[in-house]
Every structure is written in C-alpha cells, then in structure tokens.
Amino acid sequence: METTGLLYSLILIVFGLGYLAIILEYNIKINKTAVALLMAVLCWVVYFSFSRIAIAEDTLALAKHLSDVSQIIFFLMGAMTLVELIDSHKGFKIVTDVIRTNSKRKMLWIVAFTAFFLSAVLDNLTTTILMISLLRKMVPTRSERFMLSCIVVVAANAGGAWTPIGDVTTTMLWINGQLSTLKVMQALFLPSIISLFVPMLYYSRKQKGEYSQPAQEEFDVIPEPGARLVFYMGIGALVFVPIFKTLTGLPPFMGMLIGLAGLWIATDLLHHKYEHRQHLRVPAVLTKIDMSGVLFFLGILLCISSLETAGILRELAQWLEQTIHNQVIISALIGVISAIIDNVPLVAGTIGMYPLTEFPIDSSLWHMIAYAAGTGGSMLLIGSSAGVALMGLEKINFFGYMRLMTIPVFIGYLSGFGVYILQMKLFAVH
C-alpha cells in the first residue's frame, strides 16, 4: 500500500511540474514539446520503477498505450499532410472566394458554425486542422485571428459531442454499446449548440469593426495546376474517414492513410513531368509539416496513459462515485476534470463503473457523460485533442486562451447541461 501511495505521489509530482512548465512556456523559455516528451518518459520511468506487476505485463501495457497513441499520431500526420497539400496548391481559394467578408462579427459566426457542423461530420481534431488552415488565408494577421482560432476549438468540440463519429469519447461510448446513433444526436444536439451559442453571444459583442488587413488580398492568389482536383479529393478523403471506419470496422487512421495514399498517387501523376512543380508533390509537402506539434501531442498522450496505467484515473472516478452519489454532478465534474486530464481514460473509467445492466443503452447517464467529456475540454487549451493541436499549429499561449475563453466557455458548458436536464425532465429520459 505504501509503495502504491509513493507511486501515485511521484507520478503526480512529475505530471504537475511538467504541466506547470507547459503553462509557463513563454516565461521559462523552454519549448512545451521538450517538456511534454520529458514528462512522458519520466512518468513511465516512475511507474516501471515502483510497479509491483511483472515487467513483461508492464511492457505489454505500455505497448497497448503506444498502439492507441500511434493511431492518433498517424491520424494527425495524415490530416496535416492532406491539409498542407491543399494549401500548397492554393486550393483553399475555392473557400475564401465564397467567404468574402472583413467584418469581425460576421466572420466569428461563420467560423463558429462552420466548425460546429463540420466537426459533426468529420471529427474535432480534423476540423481544427482544416479550419486553422482556412483562417490563415482569410485573416493573415496572427493577433487578429487569435479569438477566431480559440473559437474553432470550442465549436469543434461542441460539434463533435452530439454525433457518434465527431468526438473520440462519443465514439467510445457508441462502440461499447452505451449510445445509439439517432438517440444521442437527438439528445445532445441542442445542449451542444447552446454550449457554443452562449459564449458566442459574449464574443460577438466584443467583435466590432473590420480586419485591418483586408481578407480580399488572399483572393488575388493564382491557384496552382490541379488545385480544384486536389481540394475536392482532399476534402473527400477527410469525409471518407468515418465512412471507411463504418464500412470496414478499421480504426480511423487507416481511412486517413488510404485517403493520403490516393491523393499522393494523384499528385504524382499530375506533376511528375514538370520540374517546376516538384514543390506540389507529397515529399516536398511533408517537409512543411509541424513535427514539433505532433511530438507535443505524443508526449501529452503518453503521459496521460501512464496515469491511467498506474490506476490514478480509475481511483479518481471511484472517489467521485463514493463521495458524491449524484450522477448529474459526477457527469458535470467529469467535464471540468477533462479540461485538465485527457477525457478518454476518464470516460473509460466510467464505462467500467456503470454496467449496462444497471444503466442500459441511451440512459441519461451516458448522454451526460458524452456531452461533458466532449465539450468540457474546451475550458482549457490543453483539455482536448483540438486544443492541443491548436497549441502546436498556432503557438497559442495557455494563459492567453484561459483569460479569453475559460469563463464564457464554462458558462456555456453549464448552460448546455441545464438544457439537457430540462429535456430530460420534459421527455422523461432516465
């Protein structure tokens, strides 16, 4: 028991110090990716040093987590490559030609609801990568697109929560049999859109005037040869991922890789004859991928997996159940905690705690957990895969996001919860 207590303490100290260093990146002048990788390895070193389980079993546990993490990393790399390939061909001009506005308020609403509905079809991570690439074209000044970039994360997480394929935790509950497609969409659409709409009302009042750099400057760009083909194939490949998963049962990264392979072949056939077009082929595009952001993602996910393997997250879930005894409050707290700790192991812990015999498919508990885990991560930048991706893509400061977003997003989160409880009482969902 003493060994277990020491293990928990040491891992939490390493995690806490590493988390603090990531938050203070701009103050201590140490890149967050280096901290995340160091934190991940040290957490696993501590676990292996104090674990009372055979080393072969611990190695298998690490291998399992590495398998899960690698799937996300390959998915991320594939999505980033597809988006960068479209960008290299100036393919996003097709979209920026349609969204011709310099109005800050109008742009805010367009971006938010595009991300919300796109995330429901794709997923929150892919949507964030795609929308940030679009924003760079429409709002070239980084400081001016700061709020828009943050809103993308909130909108993508809210949009992903109400469909089985939009967020990894909703997908988990769906695959495990806790949710059915139609019921979860009916139950969570309104709470999810309210969780976005409430903070949007606040930000809309703050967004006045027009952007100093006209977005129309981007419209003068001449697309590269094959831009339209690459754009539609790229978007088609992203949309195909959930379809591929449904048809084959294979994990999403496989769908992303087959989409990338198809576009790779198409661009090779399109450009191989022309020496001056070599920058439009995938090998050249791969050199532009932000590997620092990918490795940051790797470090964070491996670190969280060590907390799960050590049993810390399971203990947390059990403590909540024993202490509170109220599923509405527990579900709401899961959302708040998921802003700090990855929501996947938290949801995995709740799946183990609440058997389907007591809480059958589409019971209100599973709906509340899906909503909470999906939208709660938006409160802090590091609380969701979309937020972590944004940190890597736009180099956004943790405190900058927290000052701007945390309170309005928290109010939106509670508002969405209130709407769900109201629905539950009106329609007698149990």
Image: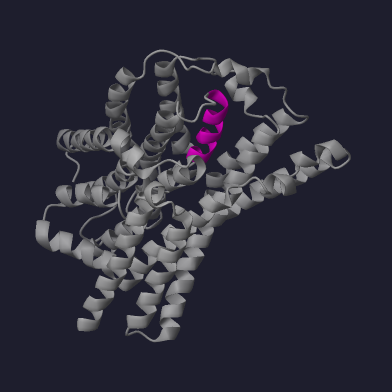
Q: Quadrant of the N terminus?
A: bottom left
Q: Could you tell me which residue is drawn at 43 percent across and 40 percent down?
A: 396
Please indicate, yes or no, whether residue 374 appears anywhere in the rendered image: yes
Vertically, is 329 above or below 91? below
Toward which corner of the image does residue 279 lie, by quadrant?
top right
Asked whether 349 or 24 is in front, the reply is 24
The spot of residue 132 in percent (x, y) is 51, 35
Colouring convention used in this rendered image of the protein? one colour
Q: Is residue 120 magenta?
A: no
Q: Residue at x 33, y 53 (%)?
A: 343
Q: How far across and down, in percent of the image, does residue 83 sit? A: 61, 39
Q: Is residue 430 left or right of residue 234?
A: left
Main secondary structure found in the magenta portion: helix
Counting from the top left corner in percent of width and height, residue 290 is at 58, 48
Residue found 36% across the figure and 56% down from its top:
21
Residue 252 at least partly seen: no
Residue segment shown in magenta = 126-138
